[in-house]
Image: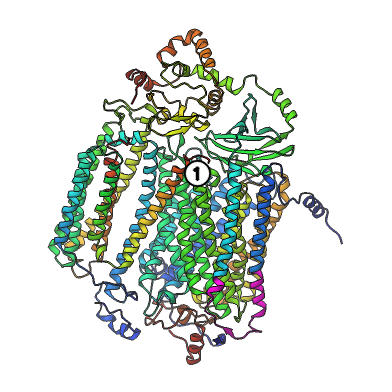
Amino acid sequence: MHISPVLWQFLVHWLTNSALFPPEASAISPYMDAFYFFLCAISAVGLIAVAILVFGFSILYRKEKSPVATQIEGSTLLEATWTIIPLALFMICFVWGALLYFRIYNPPTNAMNIYIVGKQWMWKAEHPGGQHEIDSLHIPINRPVQLTMISQDVFHSFSIPAFRVKREVIPGRYSTVWFEATATGTYHLFCTQYCGTDHSAMIGEVVAMTPDDYQKWAAGSTSGASLAQNGERLFASLGCNSCHSGEATARGPNLSQVYGSRLQLADGSTVTANDAFLREAILNPSTHVMQGYAPIMPTYQGQVSEEGLIDLVEYIKNLNSNYRIQQTLTTSQLAPGQAGASSSGTPQVNGPARAGRTAPSVPGTVNQ
Amino acid sequence: MSTIVTLPNQEEARLPKLSYLNSEYGLKSWLLTGDHKRIAMLYLISITFFFFLGGAFAGVIRLELLTPQPDLVASDTYNKLFTMHGVIMIFLFLVPSVPATVGNFVIPIMVGAKDLAFPKINLLSWYLYVAGACFLVYALLNGGVDTGWTFTTPLSTHYLNTHVITAAMGVFIAGFSSIFTGLNFIVTIHRMRCPGMTWFRLPLFCWSHYAASILMVLGTPVLAITLVLVMLERTVGIGVFDPTKGGDPLLFQHLFWFYSHPAVYIMILPGMGVISEVISTFSRKRVFGYTAVAFSSVAIAVFGFFVWAHHMFIMGVSNYSALVFSLLTMLVAVPSAIKIFNWAATLYKGSLTFETPMLYAFGFMGLFTIGGLTGVFLGSLGMDIHLTETYFIVAHFHFVMVGGMLMAYLAGVHFWWPKMTGRMYPESMSQLAAVTTFIGFILTFFPQFIVGYLGMPRRYHAYPPEFQVLNVLSTAGATVLGIGYLLPMLYMPWSLKYGKIAGSNPWQATGLEWQIQSPPLTENFVDIPVMDHEAYDYEWLAHKTEHEVTTVG
Amino acid sequence: MSTPTEHEHHVVGPKTYGAILAALLVLTATTTGVAYLDMGVFNPIAALGIACLKAVLVILFFMHIRYSSKLMMLTVGAGFFTFIVLITMTLSDYISRNWGLW
Amino acid sequence: MDSHAIVTGQEQHEEHEEHPAYLRHHFVTVEQQRETASFGMWLFLLTEIMFFGGLFMAYLLYRNWYYDAFVAGSNTLGIGLGTTNTAVLILSSFTMAMGVYSAETRNRKGLVTFLSLTILLGLVFLGIKSKEYHDKYVEHHIPGASFSVEDFVHPADKRDVPLAPDMAQHAQLFFFLYFAMTGMHALHMVIGISILFFLLYHAWHGAYTNGHTSTIDNFGLYWHFVDIVWIFLFPLLYLISRHPLK
C-alpha cells in the first residue's frame, strides 16, 4: 500500500510528538497528574456507564424487538443512587482539588523570591541580585522559587505548563505563585490571559539549571547593583528618608525590620507588612497609616514604575537596621541639590503640590 | 402498563387549508405580527444567519491554526475573529437559539394557550435582537472588536482602540431581547395554562424553559449595567474598574460572571428540555422520573447563581471564596448527572426508533456527558490552575455548548419541523447529517482536551510547533463538522416544497402541540383545550388514536 | 387562568394611602434626624433599616403586594434574594481576602 | 368576574362575544389579563432591581475601601435638598397611588388631577436634582480633569483637617457613583414622566376609567419602584456616611 510522503511525514511527526501530558518538571507535577488521571478515570467510568446504557437499551429495546413500550413512572431508589454516587465522587474531587490548590498557592517560607512584571507583550523578571531578564526566567532546580508578580497594564497570566502552575498577573496588585523545579531543561512560558494584539507572542522560556549553573549564570548576568541597592538609590532620590529616617522624632515610621511584622494601623486594624502591603503603602498611603502617625505622606501613584516599586520593596525588606537609612540620609544631605529639598519635606518628586499644601498644616506626629 | 403506538399513515395526510403560514400575506404581515409562531420563524431565519456568520469566523480561526506560524491573518485580525466568533455565537446564537425559535413556537401550544402572554413584547424582543445584531454587524464592518467576548477590563476600557462601545451596546440591546423573551415565558407558563394543565402535567420542555427564563430575567440586567459601566469607563474614564484610579478590575469579573455563568445554563437548559421531549417520543415512554428531571432544571437555575467565581480561581479571589465557590460548583454538577441517567433510564423497556432527532439526542447525551465531566476537572480548585485559560477549557465549553446545545437545537428543529412547516425533512439525508456532525465534532474538539493539558493557551494566534499534530486533527474535524452543519441548510429549504406532508402527529408524540394541525392555525386552538392526562401519557394517546379517525383542528 | 391563586381584585382606599404617606414622611424625617446623631456603627444600620421599612411599606400598600397572591410575594422575594446573593457573595470575597493565605 | 373554574372550550367560545373590547384575544377572562399584566410588570421590576444591583455593589465595595473619601464626599451633599426631594418623591408616589384609586373607582376627574399632580411632583424632583447637579458643577465636584479635592475634610477630625490627597482623589469614585446612581434614577424619572404625559392625554379622553385599569396599575408599579430606588439611594448617598465609623 502506497502512503504518500506527506502523510508519512505527518505520521512520523505525530508519533514522535504524541505526548499526552507535558513533561513533569516540578515537585507538584506528579500530584497534579495523579489527580488528572483520577479525574480521567472517573470521566471514563461515567461515559462508559452512559454509553452502555444508551447502546444497550438501543439494541435491546429497538422497535423491531420491542414493539410494546412499558410505561414506568420512575424509581426513587435508582434516582437516589445516581444522585448520591456522583455527589460522593464530586466531593472527593473537591477535597482533592482544594488540597492541591493550597499546596500550589501557599509558598514555603524558605522560597527564594523573584519578581515578575508583565506588560504588553513581554515578561520582565527581576532577580534580587539585580539580574534582569526579558521573556526568560532562569531558576535553580530543587529549590522552592516564589514569584511575586504584577502587571503594568492589563491582566496577564503567568503559566508554565511543565511545572503545572499558573497565576493571573493583575494590574495594581501583587499575586504570587511558587514551584520547585525538579529537572533541568528549557520549558515553555506562556501568557494565558488574552492581553491584546500580540498576546500569542508574549511567550518565553524557563531555564531550569543545577544550582551550580544557576550561581554561574547569576554571577555572569548581574547588572552590578542588586534590587535593594537600586531601591536604596530610589529611596534617597524620592526623599523618603526625610520622614522615614528611623529617628525617634521622625514624621514617618521606622522602616527597619518592618517587613513581616504585624502593624497596628490608625483605623484600628492590624496587618502583616508583606510585599503587597508595602507597595500599597507607597501608592495609597492614607489607607495604610500606622497608629500614631499623621496621614501626611503624599501618594507616589504614577511617579514610580512597577520596577521602581519592586526595588523599593526589596530595599525595605532588607532593612535590618537603621544604619543604611542614616547612611543614605547623610549622603543625600551631602548632595548639594537635595539638601534643601529633603528638609522641607517635598523633595524633587514631580507634582506633589497637594502634599506641599497638606504637610505644613499638620503637626509632625498627631496622636488621634 | 404497555402501549403500542403505530405511526400514522402519512400518505393520507393533507396540508390544512388555513394555517398561520397562509392566514395573511405580505412582508408587513410578518414584520408586524403578534403571532408567536411567525416570530419564531423570524428568529429562526436571523439566528441561522448569525450561526453561519459565527461559523465562518470559526472556520478562518481553524484554518489559521493549521500551522504554528501566524501566516494566514495578522494578529489583530485573528483577535477580532475569535472575538466576533464568541460574541455572535453566544449572544446572537446560543442564548436565543432554542428558546426564541423552538420555545417561542411550541411553549404557548404546549401549555394550551393561544399565544404568549405579551405578543407585542415578543415582537419587540425580536426587534431588539435585530437592533443589537445591527450594532454588532456595524462594529464588524467598521473593523471589528478585539476584546474577546468577555470584555475584560482594563484591556477593553483603556488599551484597545476598536469599536468596543458599539459592540458593548449591541450586546446590551441583545440582552434586553433575551430578558423580554424570558419574562414572556415565565408569565405564559404561570398564567396562560389551559384548564387541567397543572404544573406536573407540563411537558419537561416547559420546565426547563421556565428555569432558563428565571436566569434570563435575573441575570441579564447585571450584564447590562456592567457593560454600561464599561462604556462609561471608556468614554468618561470613571475609574470604577481602573486600578490606577482606585478601582478594582476584579469587580468587573465578579459582575460579568454573575451573568455570564448563569448564561451557560440559559443556553443549556432549553436544550435539555428538547432532549426530554425527543427521548420520550422516540422511546414511546414516559420520561423516567418526571419530577426529578423537572426539579433538577430548577435546581440548576438556582445553584447557577452561586457558582460564578469559579471563573476567577486563579485571578486572586480569596482562598475562602474559592473554596466555597468550588464546593457549590460540584453541587451544580449533580442535577445534570441526574438528568443524563434519567434519560438513559427512559430508554429501558421502550420501543425505540432512531429518527434524526433521536440521533441528535444520543449525540447530546454522549457529548454533554464529556462536557459536564470535564467541567468537574475545571471546578476542582487544583486542576483548574493548570487547565484554565488553555485549550482544555475551549474544548470543555464547546462540548457543552456545541456538542450539547447545538445538537439539542438541531434535534429540536428537526423534531418540530413537521409542526412548523407541515412537511417532513428527508430522513436518510438528515440522519447522515447527524452522524457527520457527531464524527466531525469529536474529531474537532477531542484533540483540544489533549493539547490543552499539554498547555496550549487559548486565543493564541501562533503556537509552539509540537502542538501542530493535534491542531491539524482539529482543523480536519472542523471541515467535517462544517459539512455536517451545511447539509441541513440544503435539505431543510428543499423540504419546504418537496418534503412529504407530515400530518398533525407524525411522531405520535403526546404534547398538546401534536394534537393540532400542522402547521397550526394562527390561534393555535379553535377551542381552548382541557388537559385531562399526565404529560407523556402514551396510553391516552393510543386510546385517542383508536377513537379518532381524523385529527383535531 | 388555571392557577387557583387568583384573588378578587382588591381596591385600596385613600385612607390607607394617606396613612402610609404619613408614615413614610415621618420615617423620612426620622432618618434625616438620626443621621445627625453620632451612633457609630448603628448609623448605617438605622439608616438602612428605616429605608427597608419604607420600601416594605411602599411595596405592601402602594404596590398592593399585601393584597396579592403568594406568587407575587414570592416573585418580589426572589428579586431581592438574588440581589442579596450578588452583594453578599461578592463582598464575601473582598472581605475574606484580608484573612490572609492561611 | 372569576369564571376560570373549568371552562370547557365550547362555553368559552360562546362567551367570547360578550367580552369588553380591551380583552385581547388570547386571554380568557379580564381577570386573567389583569393578573398577567401585573405579573409581567413585576418581573420587569425584578430586572430593574438587578440592574441597579450592579451599581449598589460597586458603591458598597468602594465605600468599604475608601471610607474616608466617601464620608467626605457624602458630607458635601446638601442634606436639606436630599430630604426635600425624598419627601417630594414620596408625595408623588402617594398621588400616583391615588390616581390608581381614581381609575379603579372610575373617577375620570380624579384620575386626571392626580396624574397631573404626579407629573408636577416628578418635575419638582428633577428640578431640585438639577439644582444639586449644578451645585456640584460649581464646586468642581464632577469627576474628571476639573475635579477639585479642596473641600474634602477628614471626617474623624473636628478641626477640618483636609483629607490626605490620595484619599481625596478617591472622592472622585464617590461622585462618579453618585452621578451614575442618581443619574440612572433620574433617567427612570424622565421616562416615567414622559409616559405620564401619554397616560394623562388618554385619561383626559376617558381611557382607564372604563374598568380597564391595567395600564395605570402597572405604571403605578413602575413609579413606586422608582420611588423605592430613591428610598435606598437617599440614605446610602446622603445619610449613612455623616458620621465616621470608629
Task: Name which quarter of the figure residue A292 lies in.
Answer: top left
Task: Name which quarter of the figure residue A267 lies in.
Answer: top left
Image coordinates of residue B529 in percent, x first then y, are 39, 82
How would you rate the neighbour count of disc 1 (Cα within 10 Å): few for under 14, some for 14-19, many for 20 or more?
many
Q: Is residue D106 left or right of residue A144?
A: left
Q: Element type at marker 1?
A: loop
Q: Is residue B247 magenta?
A: no
One can see residue B413 in this view? no
- Judge by depth and name the residue closer to the eye, A212 or D190: A212
Classify the position of the N terminus of chain D by image quarter.
bottom left
Q: Amino acid at mark 1?
A: Ser
Image coordinates of residue D87 in percent, x first then y, are 19, 48
Q: Residue at x 19, y 70 (%)?
A: D210
Q: Is residue D57 positioned above or below B291 on the image? A: above
Q: Is residue A86 left or right of residue C19?
A: right
Q: Which residues are magenta?
A: A50-79
Q: Residue at x 21, y 54 (%)?
A: D93
Q: How is the image coloured?
A: rainbow
Q: Is residue A64 magenta?
A: yes
Residue placed furthest toward the left: D109
According to the picture, the residue beneath numbered tag 1 turns out to be B318
Q: Residue at x 61, y 22 (%)?
A: A226
Classify the position of the C terminus of chain D by image quarter.
top left
